[in-house]
Amino acid sequence: MKTAVLMMALAASPAMAQSWQPQSSGIDSELRGLSVVSETVAWASGAKGRVLRTVDGKIWKAMTVPGAEKLDFRDIHAVDANTAIIMSAGPGDASRVYRTTDGGETWKLALTNPDAAGFWDAIAFWDSRNGIMFGDAVNGAFQVLVTADGGASWQPVTDPGLAALANEGAFAASGTCLTVSGNNDAWFATGGAANARVFHSADRGRTWRVSVAPLPAGAPARGIFSVGFRDGRHGIAAGGDYKETALAEVNGARTEDGGATWSAAPILPAGYMSVVVPVKGTLQSYVAAGLAGSGYSNDDGKSWTVLDRTPMNTVGFASPSVGWAVGPKGLLMKYAGPVLGKK
């Protein structure tokens, strides 16, 4: 009875009731990619070759990339209102990269995965020209590719530090199993194997070191689904088990040494989290979300407050008060909760 009363009180709290406001996506496809450029410009991507864009923060235009109707665009990086790079995830040549420089009027295929056993998971960019892409292991090593021309061309990286464990893989659930910070740092996270692991590069993806984080693993659906860093040292990992979305196990970890070591830091709401991102314009604030709902922390992940129970796939923020979330069946929402960063 006490538990039921507590849950009813929490669900009725003003913060939860007003945390997100629906916006119309105009589609019913699963959305997993999101790139927030500013308080008015943002892009999203998803299944069936769909891409969305807003230039006023209110109205979203949906488009389909020609010839990509069967692809699942799990990640997107936008430079501005006109330029964006999208990545599809899938086996072999179903993993592709496209670019637009005219607001999505036209798209150019930049790269197709040449390995039949490959499966790309995420992309990230340090700036408008320098970026990195990450994929599941081929011949025992994770795929990493880098670009120095805005995603028009990509070069593979070979390094002993990319060796994968048996059954180890990544989760293309939100476009955030790979992240970057500053001018040179990159991290990607894995699961499935006996341990959940985080790989770190301090030289734009050329060399890698790996550490173990205290999140559940050991099964295909378990591990770290997202990593977010506010600088080169402070970061949070989020995950769980996507088949058991309310599983009461550790779903978060935090680091203060660039990912060399991790300590357990459970995220609220409890359960499966597919994304954690730092909030632009704040010092120590993060938002995490997943099929269990969404929550925020204003103290580098040491404590969390529940925002909402709406199932989501990913989130992104332009400022402490402006952000978006996307998710299942074309879900698109704009942040309307408390200003983040205030303690």
Image (tube, rainbow, N blue to C red):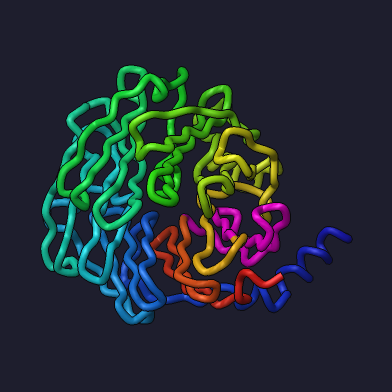
The count of marks equals 0
Percent x, y for residue 247?
A: 66, 43
- Residue 226 in the image: above or below residue 36: above
Q: Residue at x 66, y 63 (%)?
A: 298
Q: Is 309 placed left or right of 40 in the picture?
A: right
Residue in the foreground of this view, choosing between 188 and 66? 188
Q: Residue at x 30, y 78 (%)?
A: 55
Q: Quadrant of the C terminus?
A: bottom right
Percent x, y for residue 83?
A: 21, 64
Residue in the foreground of this view, choosing between 101 and 223? 101
Q: Quadrant of residue 211?
A: top right
Q: Is 140 placed left or right of 130 in the picture?
A: right
Visible in this render: residue 16? Answer: yes
Q: Is 314 placed left or right of 27 in the picture?
A: right
Percent x, y for residue 210?
A: 50, 28
Residue extending furthest toward the right: 2
Visible in this render: residue 238? Answer: no
- Residue 8 in the image: above or below residue 218: below
Q: Residue at x 43, y 43 (%)?
A: 185
- Residue 98 in the image: above or below residue 143: below
Q: Residue at x 22, y 46 (%)?
A: 148
Q: Quadrant of the N terminus?
A: bottom right
Is residue 296 covered in magenta? Answer: yes
Query: Magenta residues?
Result: 286-313
Percent x, y for residue 54?
A: 31, 75
